[in-house]
Structure formats: structure tokens, C-alpha cells
Image (spheres, rainbow, N blue to C red):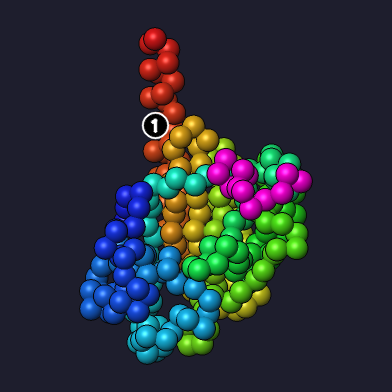
Amino acid sequence: MGTGGSFVSVEFQNMTLGELKQYVLKHRDSQSAFEALMDRIDAQPQQHVYGDVDANEFRHLLELHCSNVTVRNAEQGLWHWKNSDTLSPHIRQEILNANVLFVPFKQEHSSEGVFAAETESLFTYLRDSNRDEINADICVEDDAYRVEALYADPITITVLGTIVVSSIVAPIVKELLLDYIRDSKRKNGTDSDLRLKLIIDNEKGLIQEIHWSGSSREFEKLLPEAIDRVLSQQKLMNDSTATKASDT
């Protein structure tokens, strides 16, 4: 598992998408550059993704970084999304008590966000799981929900989306994600490549995001380990905060 800081390198942020693609192709072992590239691609309309590099070469690059999970600190947790300026008071009230929130990919040069094609299926699975602890919702106005395939042939990645969850229900979400992937494998009869951003918010100031890119087979092993590690770190922080409070 890799770990990262709060922000993608300023060097990468200042590159154009084409420059960043070329950088990653020349520095194939740089996981930080690869994650910066994937974040930028998630923010692009599909037709802009393959313009600067050969699509097959890009597919081989993805395979090189396959089955990789990284963890880094984040700033935007449940409170941020529930109070987004893009939401009407009505929607803010609807999602007020959500502890599992699907949020959009923000696209460059646009005020609107989009959702991955798999979002609604996964959301429905969590919502209908009959787990009383789970209160799942989608962070969007009803008439602004837009779905876009983020990748096209020859890239075959199932993007599960970006999900913000309370650390309290993260262990249950972990179980349900594994069940969802196993069910999908049974239906499809094969493994698939997956991409997921899972943001875990302890709602006390520590927000961490887990990025997964890789096969569904490895997903079942590596992602739970990453979630457990994040929850352990957050528990240590909570315990430390509670100890300091009791000493004052």
C-alpha cells in the first residue's frame, strides 16, 4: 500500500493533460504521477482522454499500475458535500443524515459534475442492503444527475465512483462492497478491472481517501486491508484526542 500527502504535487497540477501523460510514460514507476494522471482523466470528457498518446500504450500503462491501492489525507468530507453551494436547500435537507454519500467527478472547465456509469447500480445495492445502519444518498440535484463513461475501448475499467462514508459505517460498507464485487463476478463470469475512490471521514477532523485501481480479484484482498488500516489510524487519533480532553 502506498501513502500520500494531502495534495497532488504542484508540478503535476501545472502540467497540461498531454504533458502529464508523457511524463507518466517516461516515469513509469512513479505512482504519485500515475495517481495525478488518473485524477485528471476522471475530470475529462471521454473524447479528451486519448488525444495525446496511443490508446494501447496507455492501456499497457494502466496494467503496469494494476492492483494498486494508495491512501492519502483529504480535505473534503461529509460536511463539505452536504453543504455544497451547488445544492438547493431541499437537497441539503434530504442528504443531511446520509452517512454514505456518492459524489460527482468534477470535470475541468465545467461547473457540473458527472457520475460513473456504475454509480446507480452500486448505490441501489447499498440502499437495498437491508442494513439499518446505512443511510446512502447521491449528492446531486435530481435534474442534474449526469452519467458518463469515463473510459472507452481499448480501456476496460469499471469505475465504481467516489464515495464518502462515515468511519462509523465504514466496516459495513467494506462488507457490502466485497459482496457487490463478488455478485458482479458471478454474473459476468470473469474478473474485471476496477477503479474506486473511497473517502473515510471520522467527522472529527481526520479525512482520508483510498484510491483503488486494479483487478476485482485483488480488490477482495487489498482494499479491505486499506480500509482497516485507515480505521485503525482514525481510532488512534480519536483515542488520543479523548485522552487529552480527560487530562484537561
- Residue at (61, 43) in percent of width and height: 83
Q: Position of residue 127 (x, y in %)?
A: 72, 53
**Would you say 192 lies left or right of 28 here?**
right
In the picture of the structure, the residue carrying the numbered disc 1 is 236
Residue 120: image location, x then y, percent: 69, 64
- Residue 186 appears in view: no
Query: Is 23 a magenta residue?
Result: no
- Looking at the rendered structure, the kind of residue marked 1 is Leu
Q: Is residue 58 above or below residue 15?
A: below
Q: Observer-nearest residue: 147 or 18?
A: 18
Residue drawn at the location 63% of the way across and 53% of the way down = 86
Q: Residues within 10 Å of mark 1 (few under 14, many from 20)?
A: few
Q: Position of residue 105 (x, y in %)?
A: 54, 63
**Which one is nearer the viewer's eye here, 180 or 196?**
196
Expressed as whole percent of the image width and height from the top left, the position of residue 198 reads: 50, 54
For this view, does 177 lie left or right of residue 33?
right
Secondary structure state at the residue bearing disc 1: helix
Front position in the image: 73 or 216:
73
- The one of 225 and 34 positioned closer to us in this rendering: 34
Residue at (49% x, 58% y) in the render: 197
Residue placed at 71% from the left, 57% from the top? 141
In this picture, residue 38 sits left or right of residue 165: left
Left or right of residue 175, residue 56 in this image? left
Q: Which residues are magenta?
A: 79-90
